[in-house]
Image (spheres, rainbow, N blue to C red):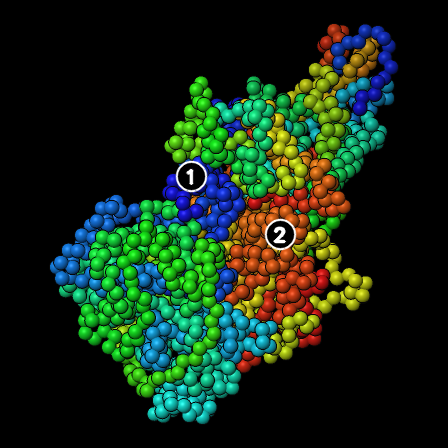
Amino acid sequence: MRQLPGAFLVFAVISAAVVGSAGCATNAADSAAEAAFTRGTKNLLPNELFDDNLVTAVGKPLEEPIEQPIVFPHDRHVQTLGMECQYCHSGARKGVHAGVPPTQLCMGCHNLVPTEGRPELDKLKDYYAKEEPIPWVKVHDLPDFVYFNHKRHVTGGVQCQECHGQVQEMGVAERVATLEMGWCLDCHAQHDSIDENYGTKAELRRAELKDCYTCHK
Amino acid sequence: MATMNRRDFLRNSAIASSATAVACTWDPKVPVENVLPYVHQDDDVLPGVAQYFATTCTACASACGMVVRVKEGRAIHVSGNPDNPSAVGLCTRGHMVLTETYNPDRFAGPLKAGQPATWDDTLAGLQQAVTQARTDGKAVAWLGQYRTGSLRRLLDELGAGIGLRRVHWDALGVETLLAASRIAFNKDVLPTYDLAEARTIVSFGMDFLSTSVDAMHMIDGWSKARDPKQGAFVARYVAFEPRVSVTSSQADNFLPPTPGTEALVAMALARIVHDKVKYSGPASALVSGVDVAAAVQASGISQEKLEQVAGWITEQPSVVLPGGHANASVDGTALAVATLLINEYAGNIGRSVVFGRELDLGPVNSYADVKALLEDARAGRVGVLFVDGVNPVYNLPIGDNVAEALAAVGTVAHFASGPNDSIVGAAIVLPTGGGLEDWGDAEVIAGLHSMQQPTMNPAQDTRSVGDVLLALGKVLVPAAAAATEVPAPAATEAAPALADGASPAVPAAAPAVVAPTRAGFDAADFGAYVKARWEREIFPLSGATDFTRFWVETLQRGGFFQDATKVRADLVLTTAPAIAGIAAGTEPALVIFPSPHLGDGRHANQPWAQELPDPLSTYSWTSWVEIAPATAKKLGLGESDKVKIKTDAGEIEVGYFASPGVPENVVAVNLGNGHEQMGRYGTGRGANPVRLLVSATDPVSGALAYYGTRATVSRAAGASDVFAAVGNIDQDGRPIANTVTVDEAVAKLEGEAGSIVHLHSIPLDERLVSQGITDMYPEPQHPTYRFGMAIDTNVCNGCMACVVACNLENNIPFIGPDQTRKSRFMSWIRMDRFWEGEGEHQDVRHMPSLCQHCAHAPCEGVCPVLATYHNLDGLNAMIYNRCVGTRYCANNCPYTARRFNFHTWQWPESMHLMLNPDVSTREMGVMEKCTFCVQRIRAAKDSWRDVGQTVPDQALQKLTACASACPSGAITFGNAKDAESTVAKKWESPRAYTLLGELNTKPGIRYLARARFSDGAVSDAGGHGSAPANHGAAPAHHEEG
Amino acid sequence: MSVSVPVEAAATVAPIKAVYKHLDCLVTGIDGLKRAGFRDIHVMTPFPRHEVEELIYEGEPSPVRWFTLMGGLFGATMAFTMTALMSANWPMIMPGGKPLVSIPPFIIITFEGTILWASMFTFAALLLLCRLPARGLPKEVEDPRFSNDHFGIVVERVGAHNAAQIKSILAHSGAIEVTGGGEDAAHGAHHG
Amino acid sequence: MKGPTYSSVNRDVLAPLFTPNAAYMGALTAALAALAWGGYCWAQQLVHGLGVAGYRPPVFWGVYITTFVFWVGIGHAGTLISAVLFLTRSRWRTGIYRAAEAMTIFAVMTAALFPAIHVGRAWYAYFLFPYPNQRQLWVNFKSPLMWDVFAVSTYFTVSTVFFFIGLVPDMAAVRDSTRGYTQKLYAVMCLGWRGTDRQWRHYMAAYGFFAALATPLVLSVHSVVSWDFAMAQTPGWHSTIFPPYFVAGAIFSGCAMVITLMLPLTKIFKLEDYIHVWHFEHLAKLCLFTGGILTYAYGTEYFIAWYSDNIYEWGTFVDRVVGNYWWVFATMVFCNCLAPLPWYFKKVRTSYLWLFVISILINVGMWFERYNIIASSLSHSFDPAGWVYYVPTYIEWGIMLGSFGWFFTWFLLFVKIMPSVAIAEVKEMMRPPLKSDEEVAAK
């Protein structure tokens, strides 16, 4: 008599399953006309549920090296040829984006460089001949809600390497920093250039740099 | 930028769209985002940095100056061109040029009978059809909008070459005004009205703050005339028109004559003015026969009132305006002539009614001409018909059987960028690039040569009208024929071919047309044609020596603008046109009024034009009828009831708005909706009021009478689809939109201390004040900037240009009619409309209500996650991706300025390209609100930091999208911490007040109260039972200096 | 709390268990044992009786209160420190011009922290002091009647030489059943 | 022997456990069905966004917050009965406190769902907790919602532990009357409770402290909930009277809910020997008292709104009576102010039927009170341009129904798994069996 009947438990489990499955079934609550304006696309198992917030409390692991359409050797261009970063990434000092050079700029030199035994150069010339942009894969991809201005950092005296690592020693560029908010804040809270550039107003500048609107758009 | 091809455009788009991926969230597990470089990068292109192009707006015939902001090859914003004297800001319809470009229903290429075709085939077919028509002796006709500048010239040339029968017609056209100008001055151009000069503005219906031609220019004058600071006076505005329109809602005295008696009233007024000033000029005899008593009797406007108005007209500099509703009756021209007479008697001609900046809209034909053309078409006498940007099926009365007439034409070719009601059957579509992609120019206002340049590469396979005409001309116009000098006056050349009865009474003035040359057709494309014409005709006017330099400067400034002097024209009038009076009847007279956003209906497929609430009814996405509240009561109408309007021509069923500004003998329906075929946003919404017209015309000008058809109103079955964006008709006695009397405003000039706004304020404890304590907590410190805004409600007429500019700048989604009906507007600016008065003193108060950026913001304290906070620059910041969506902030905002994303709103695929990459798009569940365009602030600070300076006032005044769009300059932005800034000075204006100041939220926006004449002013702004001792004794705010 | 009574180092027998039906008999039994110096006892009741507590602990209050106090103090300190430090961690202009560390709202958090931690400490004290989950109890205390309608006494660590005396005290106090205490007493149940 | 004995207490109280009959299964099925529908509606909302609810800006809060406050309020009576009446040594508490306390726990569990349901991005609801993160971000301790987070979670934790402590001796009793794995299960749950002198000694001390801690807690929780409104400056919310008014209302609705729940429970499980009409009478009196406070508070609100001469405040209060929400106001006044008045008559408050009917009316009325505060204030705020009429959609009603399903599922499971009357405390109240009594009786 004093036993939980098995049927009772089974019933409870089944009912719970019904709750769950009924909840997963979707049925557009909006009229079809409304759906043109409202978009019901929230996946019930969104990545947001496993968003970086909790994970990155201990630091998100950096992803594996990225495969680029052309294996571009940064080290050779910088170390062997002695090129400056901003020869190609010329927007870094002038604008928001550092920019990837137009193929035309590559061809400025590579017109003269023989392609024999250099399959990557063939690809480059191929893209140029076809008038197609080279589909570089973003290595440093900030979220769309972040405003990052290269100009302010570069003209303020932040070295490229502080964020991008020793690119001059890399072949294909790799990401070395997490690019997380906390990582950004480390410098925004204290960076030598703040004192150097702002002197007596450094304290104010530090406060400004911690203003959410400095980076969030 | 002209050298970029279509592929470049797509490439650019790809860069930008990757930066604009739609979500607030970042999923680190999706790493593959490409960064696509240019293959060839122009020197002036820097990804991430905006470019600006000065060009010309093509949304209506006014051709105002416009600046287009382009980022990564995509036009993303438009605003007024400050270098172009034609306008200060840009109206709502002007902003639709942008959505038109990215409209998902835009034609991707030429169509024939709905099937895609190639340009080569299409043009070859057209050339053949034209040749065939001419061989068969049929007309090659052109039915199109008003065209000026190079296109007008090209049409002249082509017309001369192939015998084109042209009819230039605009549904909101100026036929009556032009007819009056021809009769009165023997001039084929329109005078301009300089409102800034006037201290009394009397309008017989002109929609000069909204839809009339040159409205932007007149708004500028209006705002000067209304600003007490400008000349220590406020101009009085008297409106004689059948209903309160967006414009006449600003009237100090609203005097609706009995429908059909407007011209009588005008003549009576002319007579009184004539007598008052003891006019003795040659035009004196014209009013000798006017019976004032009869006019008083017929119109229901008392003689005393007329005398009073005449007094205002004569005692001070004044201006009397014709146009709009009242003018669109069978007496349109008579009324327009009468207003010119008043102006003459009052001495306004040459002072406030002037030539020298006259309006020349190119060849202007009347509705009667259109009818005649259609008559010929129906009779099979038209072989080819080009339709250029007009929609005759929609805009012409049903009795005209337009569709049938079009079907009888051998080949109909439409120049259009998107679908409209007239593109039916086997019609050919020649898709145009619209205002942002095509070359062109315009010279609507004399001396203002406005340049239209491509701001981006064509997103679709389109060609400009000019390019098509050039292509046709190259083949069709024989070199020898065109090479001979053909002095073909454009406006009249079609006239001999017209059926009898069209425009008989209009004496045709011979326009000065430079003879065409064959060389025009040799131009490589229309851009080259334009450039060649400028070099030939406009460059010599500049007095410059280097054309290349002149050309570059022209492109930079958006045109070449000559100075002008006011020119007086003498009245040549001998007899005034007869006044017929509209059909008598006991039923109310129907008024069809243009929507300020949809215009004549051409913008109906622009989602923003649909979604912007009407400034008066605050309805959107549909049509409605405005009836008097008494009529609604009489019919026993419930809030969601439908109304049936029936005339001899037809009937429609729409929702209603019980407008206090509509007399019982008038019903008014908005034009613009009720399309049968207008793309996804425009089709099947509301009803087409033109269907109610019996195609009556003004016999003098041949204009269609939009006003005067007798209509019966009854209750219809079913629920209406109207929804008011503003919850209450008035402000329920609350001091939200406040007024001061003109006497007070003029007596206390700007800069003098003390407020003249009567507000309830709680007196502070003297003991605390003496210790310097006025607040429990101190005002936050703003070390560098305190961004603030001043909004002068005195010149705000609720046109909503600020709203749409904000929407486009800040990626605010449109939400569609269903969500609109749930009040879920996303626009950060809500245009409050409080209808405080009735009868003669309507007192409609418009007030843009947006985030007030309070220093003591109620929203900030209650956010549990600090997603909103006050920043060092005085901005009330909102960080979207921190927001959980508790909505507490929105509940606690006394200004209800916060908007919530109830869904992840959707832009159609092509409209993604319109999004501003500097602003996040927001996903469902996130709160948002006005940021004072923080992205623009950020960019300005960034630029000025490069030179080590703070942003100067000059760069801030019009920084925000709303401020830069406002045509009347009502919105001023700036750094209020800088005492020398414009905004700081406006903050100290005697008319300044903070909204709900007694809550001590210390807003970053101050409103400048409206000045009203004391004969119509509400005695107490607040209507609050507070002790009079508090009134005016202390301002409601105790902020820092 | 069981008080350790000096018991001769002699061999102990199994604990003695007495079952009562009447409360007054139980009290008599406890009193008898106490007078005889046998204080290593467990008294089982289905519900709390103050008589029993009074007899055994002579009014000495339970030390739970110190735990509660400590918990409260800990909670208050922790909650206030937490709120203050977390607020000060990112200085920003606070809404309405209130100070960064603003006492009135923080008092609410502090109050909740106080209650929370005082409760948690009290609960911990309960488990700790009652030695729950149960440890160190003789098997004899396990009797379903004790949670129903009977009372019981279990005398632990009974020296073989005392068993008879204890059983006698219990039996005479009115126990309905006395068991345990070794072989010699195996059948000493006294029914009364 | 007359009246219940110790063993009959065990027998009667434990009798309903474990063996479900058809009626019980039917009730559970109904509760689970309601829960399933609520889950479905919530899933709709998660997928499509909050737009599926009837929100009509500026009414940004509606049925969810109303129901949240309703459930938090329901919870209060349980704590009041178990803690406050324990401290005041009210004898009538013993029979009903267990079920009332269970009601508290489940009501708070139900209420705690609603913040997650109502936020726009439920998947980020964990932002509301101050957890260490790489972003160096913390929460805003000045926000009333943050106080809510702390108050409700503290309340839930403390109530649950309090409930559990009370259950320990009784679960030992269940253990002692079962066999097999059930017995083992309860042996674990009761932590090996044996009712020794040492255990009872610390138990009683701890229990007393819990009661003493829960009492201010219960007052604070609903005060904090009331501050969600009172701290805002929306007219109709911004009022210092809210904390006492809300606490009184919470006890009012909670006591009514106890009556609503316990009456059928008593009848169905034949617990009349332990839960008398006398208990219900006391509850009814408590309702009358708190209902009186509530009525007074309503009056005060109106008086202050009028006396303050604040047009916004007064406008909102007038709108409540004559505006779109007049029917909500009328329901509220009828159910909360008028409906309980018949309880002044002993005949009514001792009638099971009338007790039940009026208690349900009070529950309805108290839900509408919160709805009245939230919806009517927001829909008639400062700026007349933002005056709207908010009507909930089926999604909101569905989720509200689901909340009842959730609550009753737990409650029904509770009555089958745990003794719904406190065995030990009922026995405590009984005269203990004494030999001397029997001897006297024998004479």
Q: Is label 2 or label 1 in front?
A: 1
Tell me where residue B158 appears, x and y as whole percent.
26, 60
Going 64% across and 56% down the picture, which residue do you hit?
Answer: B952
> Badge 1 local density, few (<14 within 10 Å), some, or many (20+)?
some
Report if residue B1011 is visible in the image. yes
Drawn side of residue C140 relative to residue A103, left or right = right
Residue C107 in picture, x, y percent from top left: 74, 45
Amino acid type shown at disc 1: Arg
What x and y, as percent, mark residue D141? 68, 44
Q: Is residue B321 above or below residue C2?
A: below
Would you name the residue on which mark 1 appears? B11
Q: Are marks 2 and 1 in contact (CB under 8 Å)?
A: no
Which one is in front, B857 or B920? B920
- Say which of D259 and D8 sits in front: D259
Dot 1: element: helix
Rendered view: B320 above or below D400? below
Q: Position of residue D272 (x, y in %)?
A: 58, 39
Q: Residue at x 45, y 20 (%)?
A: A118
User: What is the quadrant of residue A162 in the picture?
Assistant: top right
Q: Earlier in the sequence, mark 2 or mark 1?
A: 1
Q: Give, as a three-letter code, the residue at label 2.
A: Asn
Label 2: how many residues lie within 10 Å, few (<14), some (14-19) or many (20+)?
A: many
Toward the viewer: B860 or A162?
A: A162
Residue assigned mark 2: B876
Q: Secondary structure at mark 2?
A: strand
